[in-house]
Image: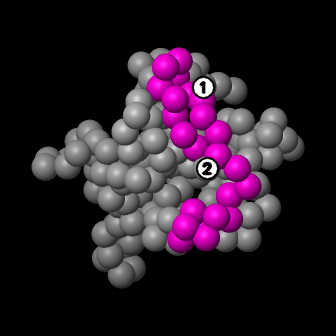
């Protein structure tokens, strides 16, 4: 099992691998087509979203932010980063239509949950998180809203399991 290194340069390859794994999962299980990633598409900032997908049936195009939470297996919480290195980050700057989480749980499974970004921001505004923590890479002082897994299960859509 991969674990975060709390070093952006070491964690980035893990994140990129997860992005492709989830894109393939969406293609295989949600009848979607991968259009590209924020790294491969022109005129896109990396902070805008991770993958751009198309629903095959409706032809609707959506941008998705993909996150992997390794700590949930130990803590029972899902973290949503909002600030890092003294600047707004991730949820505060993302232009994604959806947030998708690959969540490692204590039973050893890796669950996939998705929510509209606007609804996740609503959850934050309504303070459905149970606390705010600071951590991440040394010196980054990354600020995260922590949501209990049961709150995620009640508000996000469960899409299935991945390896």
Span shown in magenta: 122-144
Horizontal arrangement in the rendering, residue 74 relative to residue 14 (left or right): right
Residue 112 drawn above or below residue 40: below
**Percent position (x, y) of residue 140?**
47, 26
Q: Badge 1 local density, few (<14 within 10 Å), some, or many (20+)? A: some
For the residues bearing labels 1 and 2, Cβ distance under 8 angstroms: no
Q: From this viewpoint, which residue is outermost toward the left?
A: 43
Residue 52 visible, this angle? yes
Residue at the (53%, 56%) spot, across then down: 100
Q: Earlier in the sequence, mark 1 or mark 2?
A: 1
Question: Which residue is more in the foreground, 124 or 33?
Answer: 124
Residue 63 drawn above or below residue 58: above
Q: Which residue is mark 1?
A: 4
**Percent position (x, y) of residue 87?**
37, 39
* Quarter of the picture holding the N terminus: top right
**Percent position (x, y) of residue 72?**
74, 42
As drawn, the label of residue 79 is none
Q: CA distance from mark 1 to mark 2?
A: 18 Å
Question: Which residue is more in the foreground, 4 or 88?
Answer: 88
**Percent position (x, y) of residue 97?**
39, 66
Q: Which residue is mark 2?
A: 145
The quarter of the displayed image where residue 56 is located: bottom left
């Amino acid at each position: 099992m991969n674990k975060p290194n709390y070093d952006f340069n070491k964690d980035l390859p893990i994140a990129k691998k997860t992005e492709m794994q989830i894109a393939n999962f969406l293609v295989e299980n949600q009848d979607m087509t991968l259009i590209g990633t924020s790294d491969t598409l022109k005129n896109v900032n990396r902070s805008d979203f991770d993958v751009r997908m198309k629903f095959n049936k409706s032809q609707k195009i959506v941008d998705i932010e993909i996150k992997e939470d390794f700590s949930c297996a130990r803590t029972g919480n899902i973290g949503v980063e909002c600030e890092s290195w003294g600047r707004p980050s991730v949820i505060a700057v993302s232009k994604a239509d959806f947030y998708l989480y690959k969540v490692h749980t204590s039973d050893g499974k890796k669950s996939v949950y998705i929510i509209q970004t606007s609804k996740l921001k609503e959850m934050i505004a309504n303070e459905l998180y149970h606390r705010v923590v600071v951590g991440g890479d040394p010196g980054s002082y990354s600020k995260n809203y922590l949501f209990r897994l049961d709150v995620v299960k009640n508000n996000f859509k469960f899409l299935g399991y991945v390896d």
